[in-house]
Amino acid sequence: MILGCDAAGIDEDGNEVVLHSVIGQTGHGVGPKERRSILTEHYQGTFAERVTVPTWNILPKPKELSFAEAACLPTAWLTAYRMLFTNSGVRPGDSVLVQGAGGGVATAAIVLAKAAGLRVFATSRDEAKRKRALELGALEAVEPGARLPERVDAVIETVGAATWSHSVKSLKPGGTIVISGATSGDRPSHAELTRIFFLELKVVGSTMGTKDELEDLLAFCATTGVRPVIDEVLPMDRAREGFERLDAGGQFGKIVLTNG
């Protein structure tokens, strides 16, 4: 199986395009009874010279975005976009906590939330990543578990067990945790159930995003000047270096592979 969910490139007609990596969302091209999947589950992924997807999964690349920038958007950035603007219930002026600054979804959430007029707080174990979070627009970046200066309207949670209790405790009454991952594990030692029901908190699961949301995200970036944070761009034959950097946890933002 060829890995990789994100890609931007040239289609067979010479058009500059971006791929939506959820296959079978509406049945187009693969049959209405097939369950949806993402590239690399049932279909070959994007770390390749050529990629095959149903034509429905191709969107025009805005001219304002480079191929490297556009290629960052279909998974992590789309996930962050849906978490913030579809599932969290926040409005401009509200506050959000982004756990684990430096990860792909978390970095995207900081940039998108700032651009949308939200007040952003962030956490990271790494001092350098906390500094970068501030540079991207966070009002304050603290170590995981540290008390925030105020409770927030929503939490963008991708870390899981290690930060779950802090996420729950950081919410205002009636606030929302949106969770799309659990990189530290899915079994927190303190589920905080009493706090969740007593303060009427909401826990919302979120996965990827729709083609329409990707189209909206592309337009949002093109019109506002928001751009993905790119840690490094490498040719395909140096992909191993990129994976080693990811494995070491030293990246801030996306690592992009190119075909030339």
Image (tube, grey):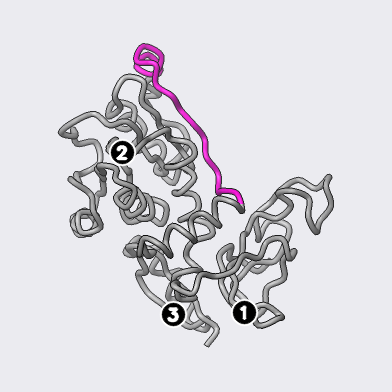
Instruction: Answer with left or right where residue 108 lies relative to residue 217.
Output: left
Q: Position of residue 137 (x, y in %)?
A: 23, 53
Disc 3 crowd, CA 10 A, few/some/many (<14, 14-19, 20+): some
On screen, residue 212 above or below 244: above
Q: Name above or below for residue 123 compared with residue 174.
A: below
The label number, if any, that marks residue 134 in the structure image: none
Check disc 2 and report the residue beneath it. Answer: 96
Residue type at the position of mark 3: Leu
Residue lying at 43% horizontally and 65% vertically, measured from the top left: 222
Mark 1 to mark 3 CA distance (whole Å): 19 Å
Q: Is residue 125 left or right of residue 226?
A: left
Distance Cα–Cα, label 1 vs label 2: 37 Å
Q: Quadrant of the N terminus?
A: bottom right
> Image check: 256 left or right of 146?
right
Residue furthest out toward the top? 198
Q: Amino acid type of disc 2?
A: Val
Q: Is residue 116 above or below residue 165?
A: below
Spatial CA distance of label 2 from label 3 is: 33 Å
Residue stretch rendered in magenta on the structure: 193-210
Query: Is residue 159 magenta-colored?
Result: no
Farthest residue, direction left? 149
The disc at residue 10 is 1
* Nearest to N terminus: mark 1 or mark 3: 1
- Give the percent coordinates (x, y) of residue 221: 42, 61
- Residue 234: mark in rendering: 3
Helix, strand, or loop for circle 3?
A: strand
Q: Position of residue 180 (x, y in %)?
A: 48, 42
Q: Picture quarter containing residue 152? A: top left
Residue positioned most to the bottom: 260
Label 2: element kind: strand
